[in-house]
Image (cartoon, rainbow, N blue to C red):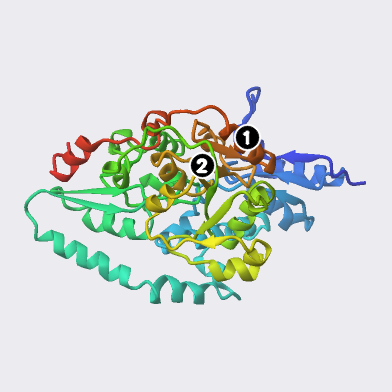
Amino acid sequence: MTDNRIILGTAQLGLKYGINNKTGKPSIDASVEILNAAFDNGVRYLDTAEAYGNAQEIIGTFHKKFGKKFKIITKLNQALSCPKIIKKHYPLLPRYSVFLLTVFYICSLLNGKPVETIKYFFDDSLLLEYEIKHGIVFNSHNIFYGIWLKNYFSGLSENVNVIYQDEFYEGGRIISKALQPYENIKTISLQHGIFDLQHTVYGISELELSDQNGDPVPTPCYFIVWGEFFKEYFLSNNLFNKNRIMVLGNLKYQKTKILKLPVKQNIKKVLWCTGSPELTGNDMAFIENAILNNKELEVTIREHPIYKYEKELQSQLKLFDRFPGIKVSKIPGILEDIALHDLVVVNCYTTAFLDACLNGKYCLRIFPYPSYPSYLKKYNSSLIFNIFSDEDVYLALQQMKGSEIIADAEGENKDIMNINIPAWEQILTMNVA
């Protein structure tokens, strides 16, 4: 008789685990027998993880020896750190490929088939063909960029600061790697966009930065972030030298006039900053009743600055059929566009709420997924309303009709958009310690 309510943990099979553990980690044979006894007594689920030592290999040994199969619940490193074998042979694989290969690798362990060569991942699959096309053929320019950069800067004897906008993605790694040998060159990369674990810099782990594997991710000498919050966020996953992270603010805002004016009471014009059809569909579920069907509000869509999704929003969501009053903005700059509206609606993945703050405008930040990191949900202020349900939208609109407030964008949000012009001048005049 099986009992699906019982899940057996495996941490102690792969590690010396537990505060009362006096005997250490059991042998592989003993661990396999424990699993066999559990299976014979009706247990069908195992909980394991990449961090549980060799627990996954032990599960694979059991599967191979007895031919019995548990259902597995496992966890990957949040930064998707790949096995040594992948890093050794394919250090520049895109992160989505690293994820796939990590999954394949773990599956091979759980099935009792340890991987000896990278060839395993490409047998009977199109993955190798895909990587050759997308990782080598279509991006072969990266190889030449690295060589060119290294050769160019080898001829410079004076001190140089190389500043580039990147968050440890492939392009930034190429620059960092190419310029590493030169002591007279300081590489400085900039935070540039949304804050989410899918962005490399915020999910990068100590394993990826450490040279223990012989192939650490190339990093810049300094990394510039917008505020103390982002510094803390980045360091939460690794042991990167905190003195190499400079809190200077976003260059975009250094010369922007920060408004400290009474915020409008009457919300008439709404700017909805959209993204992909998927994200826009999530947003729509929250604002449909309170905003899109509100005849008193004039709604304008602002498309993603790079990806123009107007056709997809219509074909996939029927957005303009369902809400014929919606307009599409033709204003080039987002700050100018926001200035023409009373309320800005954004998804939690965008930094457009900062633009709204600087214009002294109300902003609804929509959080469609409960799993979104809790430390990113703290920005409730006189201007920013975090939205977790359609009811929150109604409550926010009611609150906006309250008494007049003074919007101090810089004061309220200093930890996320620090304005530090003197520090930027120091960087640009090459006075980096």
In the drawing, what numbered circle is on residue 363? 2
Residue at the left extreme of this rendering: 157
Q: Nearer the viewer, mark 2 or mark 1?
A: 1
Task: Find residue 305 and report its horizontal and vertical position in percent.
Answer: 43, 60
Q: Is residue 26 visible?
A: no
Q: Check disc 1 and give the amino acid type.
A: Gln
Depth check, front residue: 70 or 381: 381
Asked if residue 236 is positioned above or below residue 184 in the image, the reply reads above
- Left or right, 88 with reference to 291: left
Asked if residue 405 is positioned above or below residue 339 in the image, the reply reads above
Give the labeled residue for mark 1: 398
Task: Find residue 359 and report its horizontal and vertical position in percent.
Answer: 40, 42
Residue at the right extreme of this rendering: 1
Asked if residue 243 is positioned above or below residue 153 in the image, the reply reads above
Residue at disc 1, secondary structure = helix
Task: Find residue 282 and report its horizontal and vertical position in percent.
Answer: 64, 53
Q: Is residue 169 visible?
A: yes
Give the mark, 2 or 1, whose residue is nearer the N terminus: 2
How far, Cα to Cα, is label 2 from label 1? 13 Å
